[in-house]
Amino acid sequence: MKGVKDICKGVNVWNGVRWESIPQRKNLSHYDPLTGILTDHEGNSYSTAVFGRAGRWMTVNLRTKTSPGSCENIYYPGELTSDDFSNRMDIRVAHYPNGSITNVAAVQPTTWAEEQGLLYSWALATNGKGGSDGQGNVDNIEGDGVNVDEYYEQKIQRQGICPDGWHLPSLAEWQELFAVLKEDAESNSDNFANYSSRPYTVGARGGATTAKSNIPLRAAQIPNGASNSAKEGGFDVLMTGAKTGNSMIYGNEASFWTASASLGVGTLTNKAAYATTFRPANTTDMVIGSAMRTFLYSVRCKQN
């Protein structure tokens, strides 16, 4: 496997903490409050919307291929060995939903559209929160970077791969979003009348149906969603799948990383982070749980 770059090519300056390239410093992300459009440091644009007290979120998936202010190498699944995926929690990996897991190059599949975004490893989504071996928690300052479980509280906001002024939401922030979608399903759903008896999943998983798109990515799998479209201000989750092992699960579910670390148990000890997963119509429309940090999941960013 190739080594990791510490300094970008070209002219660099020391900002007091790290080296930054001059081109990167000039190519900053931008948010337009008049249109609600967010533009990342690569020039990709995203629709956003406010969801009550849960704040402003992206309503499409992130698709940047580089972390702001970072020149760390980003890999694609075909470049890595199975041992890399099993043991290297620090590897920064990105891939297209429904993309080939054997191609060395990132080949864009014919099924891909910009709103599907990319899938990311937790190391890339958080911009290295796991530390040098990927199994720690560098935001645990008092614990000198030792991993700590953040199910109930995440003390430090994590920008991660998100544009400047935005961050990778914590588990608590995701839970607050679902509470808002549950309480105000009528405003966030384009087909509320047909979901009057079930506008969201009962209990702590509330807001799942209201958050999901009603557009299937695979004809055989209907997502059973009722969200307004992204352009209409809905959360509009597409079933973009995930890479877990050798499976992409495209069209069957959608998983999103949180910035919250998990202690994990058994083989997942210090190798897990919290994620939210949406599924088509069944008894568990959305679940929260620990996932291996090497899995590739989608990212939605939230405004600071």
Image (spheres, rainbow, N blue to C red):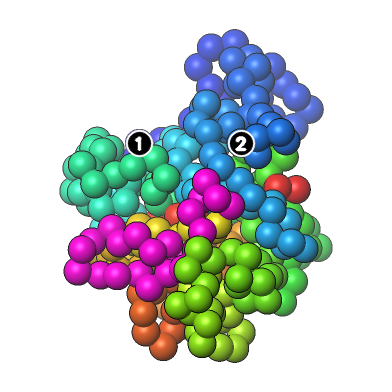
In front: 62, or 158? Answer: 62
Going 61% across and 36% down the picture, which residue do you hit? 37
Label 2: which secondary element: strand
Q: How many marks?
A: 2
Q: Look at label 1 and name its amino acid.
A: Lys
Q: Position of residue 33 (x, y in %)?
A: 72, 35
Report whether 279 appears left or right of 301: left
Q: Position of residue 76 (x, y in %)?
A: 32, 43
State the quadrant of the N terminus.
top left
Image marks 1 and 2: residues in contact by CB distance under 8 Å = no
Label 1 sits on residue: 2
Q: What segment is highlighted magenta in the picture?
A: 212-233
Q: Which residue is tagged 2?
A: 37
Residue name at image x 45 percent, y 77 percent: 194
Q: Is residue 5 above or below residue 236?
A: above
Looking at this view, name the residue that lies furthest to the top: 11
Q: Residue at x 53, y 22 (%)?
A: 8
Position above or below: 99 against 140: above
Q: Main secondary structure of the magenta part?
A: loop
The local crowd at label 2, few if under 14, some if 14 to 19, many if 20 or more residues have their Cα within 10 Å, is: some
- Local secondary structure at mark 1: loop
In this orientation, does residue 144 appear? no
Q: Is residue 152 left or right of residue 22?
A: right
Q: Residue 92's x, y, as percent?
A: 45, 46
